[in-house]
């Protein structure tokens, strides 16, 4: 992923801390650019991915500012109880993931 073209304004601290932003679908096209932009702006980012061992996460881990990136495994189709740890301590949530179903009408 290329560097973000222009740096966003500096992050305003809330209660003395840099806000933590949850980005769902961090390895997707929109999610990846969202993570890159937030990191470039100085935010702490927690990204949800289907698997933390996927080769797709290597791209995120190589981003500038990735020392402020945490990746957690989460599936959109899981119960809300499975999502609570991902949401813990987050100031903002950017829900950019979308479930992707593979199949045909014959599968019904």
Image: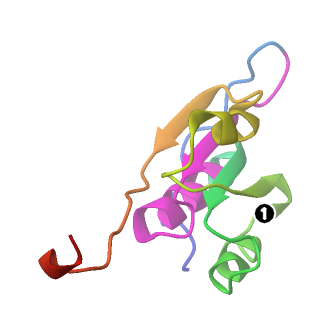
At x 41% / y 62%, what residue is drawn?
30
* Residue 39 coordinates in the image, percent (x, y): 67, 54
* Residue 59 coordinates in the image, percent (x, y): 66, 80
Q: Quadrant of the N terminus?
A: bottom right
Does residue 7 show up?
Answer: no
* Residue 10 coordinates in the image, percent (x, y): 65, 37
At x 50% / y 55%, what residue is drawn?
34
* Residue 76 coordinates in the image, percent (x, y): 50, 52
Depicted 92 relative to depicted 82: above or below: above
Question: Does the magenta run of residues contain 27?
Answer: yes
Does residue 71 show up?
Answer: yes
Magenta-tinted stretch: 16-39
Give left or right: position of 20 versus 16: left
Depicted 100 relative to depicted 10: above or below: below
Q: Quadrant of the C terminus?
A: bottom left
Residue carrying label 1: 66
């Amino acid at each position: 992923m290329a560097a973000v073209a222009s740096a966003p304004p500096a992050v305003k601290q809330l209660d003395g801390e840099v806000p933590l932003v949850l980005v769902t679908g961090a390895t997707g096209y929109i999610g990846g650019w969202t993570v890159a932009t937030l990191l470039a702006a100085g935010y702490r980012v927690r990204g949800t991915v289907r698997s933390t061992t996927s080769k797709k996460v290597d791209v995120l881990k190589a981003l500038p500012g990735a020392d402020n990136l945490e990746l957690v495994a989460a599936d959109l189709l899981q119960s809300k109880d499975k999502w609570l740890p991902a949401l813990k301590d987050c100031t903002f949530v950017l829900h950019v993931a979308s479930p992707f179903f593979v199949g045909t009408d014959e599968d019904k």
